[in-house]
Amino acid sequence: MGRADVESCRIVALQGAASSVIQDLLGELAGRLSTIGVRVAGVIESSADKSKPCKAMMLRSLDDDSVFSISQDLGPGSQACNLDPEGLALACAAVQRSISRGTDVVILSKFGKQEAAGSGLADAFGSAIAAGLPIITAVSPAMMEAWTSFAGVYAECVSVDIARSPGWVETWSGRMVTSRGAHEMIDASRERIGMG
């Protein structure tokens, strides 16, 4: 798929790098969109303890910087999955509230096992889709079959190299965002930086 085709997709899923790299990139894209006046809602992953990333996971709201712990303390010897479904549900509900208040783009940390099973951030994805909002997320190659079943023809995968490139997210959002005020700000910003 060519770059122009990707820029016409309402839902893009980033691939091609480690999860932590993609989460950093999602945060960067949110910042770039905010700079040009696009309202961004959603959550991205971060770890409170870089030495044990799976044991101290959090989701940070792009709307108001609220933090939701999505890890449970299962004790020092535990090797089991420590995902906290309650924290994930709280983060999902916060994203849905942001969508209902009004936003231009939704960025969701990932479509993973929880979402494929209809939990996790699945309802936030559904709310964004129902509202006709463009979405940026991440999907691991292992989840592609479930992702394709969920998002169908409305989504395409984008490599991190394309998403990082200068002007990509600005051009994509200019085609996807439907609110008039955001379009005026995007157009003004594009002219200012010589992209118009």
Image (cartoon, grey):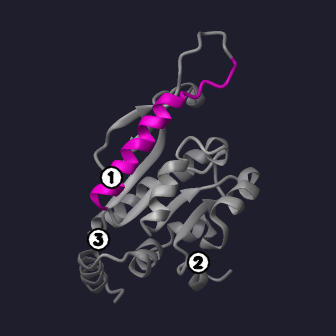
Which secondary structure, mark 2? helix
Name the residue that disc number 3 marks.
36
Q: Which residues are magenta?
A: 79-102
Name the residue that disc number 2 marks.
6
Examine the structure image and report whether residue 101 is included in the region drawn in magenta: yes
Marks 3/1 in contact by CB < 8 Å: the verdict is no
Looking at the picture, which amino acid does disc 1 mark? Answer: Ser
Lateral position of residue 192 relative to residue 76, left or right: left
Q: Earlier in the sequence, mark 2 or mark 1?
A: 2
Which class describes the residues within 10 Å of circle 2: few (<14), some (14-19), or many (20+)?
Answer: some
Q: Main secondary structure of the magenta part?
A: helix
Q: Which mark is residue 80?
A: none
Lateral position of residue 181 relative to residue 109, left or right: left
- The image quadrant where one finds the N terminus is bottom right
Looking at the picture, which amino acid does disc 3 mark? Answer: Ile
Distance, label 2 to label 3, CA atoms, is 21 Å
Q: Is residue 55 above or below residue 178?
A: above
Name the residue that disc number 1 marks.
98
Of the two numbered discs 3 and 1 in the rendering, the one whose residue sits closer to the viewer: 1
- Residue 21 x, y percent position in the rendering: 56, 50
